[in-house]
Image (tube, grey):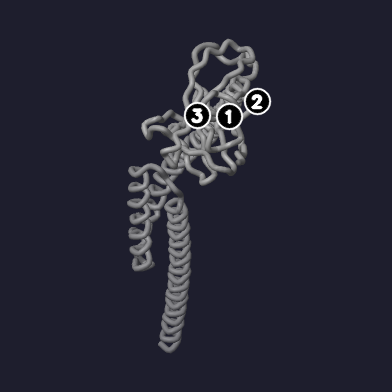
Amino acid sequence: MKKTFTLIFSVLALLIAVLIYFLFRQKQQMNEMVEQMEYEKEELEAEYEDLAIQFDGYQELNIHNDSLQDLLSKEQQRVQDLLEELRITKVTNARRIAELKKELATVRQVMVGYVHQIDSLNRTNSRLTEENRQIRQQNKAIQEQNTALANQNLQLTETVTRASMLEIHDLEVMMLNRHDRKTRIEAQARKLQFNFTIGRNITTEPGIKQIYLRLVNPQGLLMQKDSNNLFTFENSEIGYSIRQEIEYAGEELPVSMFWIINHDDPAETIQSGYYNADFFVDGLLIGSFPFKLTK
């Protein structure tokens, strides 16, 4: 009887030991499984965080496509929502973690498509930017050429104008008495005679021309018979003292112009001092001569 009890006790002790071993082993395996699931969850969180960072980087790009920009924003928010859900999901919820892992793969595929579109847009924008740069350079070159041509044309026009401009030389001013004889006595003077020569110029268009003389007295005032005696100079109407019509054929031409002195009008009388005579033809100043009248 004692032997039987001892045998039974031994068997029970063995069974208990075996059971304790299996329970310990099962707990160890559960701990290892939980650790593995925690590791996989942490890795999945890290992958979601990396993907969120990539979306942030693409959002910082200057994407000239509102539709694509909106899609990127939506996917970025989706990744952020899934990451928050993953963080609060228990490690033991293996099914949901597996679903979130599939969601990550789906988002990555969508992102690859967006990346291709962004690259395509960037290549297109780069090409258009380069084309615009080349066009701007071409336009600048054309503008510079046009400016250079305009300057050349202006210089040519000025050269032609100067070349065709008449010139006055050998000016002689004298006072004449009532007998048209030269006098030095102001009180006897009845006229001022201006003798000069228009030089030879074969580039000037021949024909009838008007010579305008502006006579300025020692007080700096224009000597003028009528305030309506005007002509055009540099887009303005200015007064003249004497006007004379000539026929010019390109060769030297002697000309005489006369100022009739009115002793009853102080503005027309002759007094000692320095005068200035400016001659104009075809809207151009062709000669300016100071001279002095003395008693």
Residue at 62% from the left image edge and 39% from the top image edge:
292
Q: Is residue 278 above or below residue 219?
A: above
- Separation of residues labelled 1 and 3 (CA atoms): 42 Å
Question: In x, y percent, where is residue 230?
Answer: 41, 30
- Quarter occupied by residue 225: top left
State the residue in front, 260 or 196: 260
Q: Quadrant of the C terminus?
A: top right
First in residue order: circle 2 vs circle 3: 2
The residue tagged 3 is: 259
Q: Residue 211: give its label.
A: none
Disc 2 vs disc 1: which is toward the camera?
A: 2
Label 3 neighbour load within 10 Å: few <14, some 14-19, many 20+ = many
Label 2 neighbour load within 10 Å: few <14, some 14-19, many 20+ = some
The residue tagged 1 is: 151
First in residue order: circle 2 vs circle 1: 1
Residue at 47% from the left image edge and 72% from the top image edge:
28
State the residue in front, 82 or 159: 159
First in residue order: circle 1 vs circle 3: 1
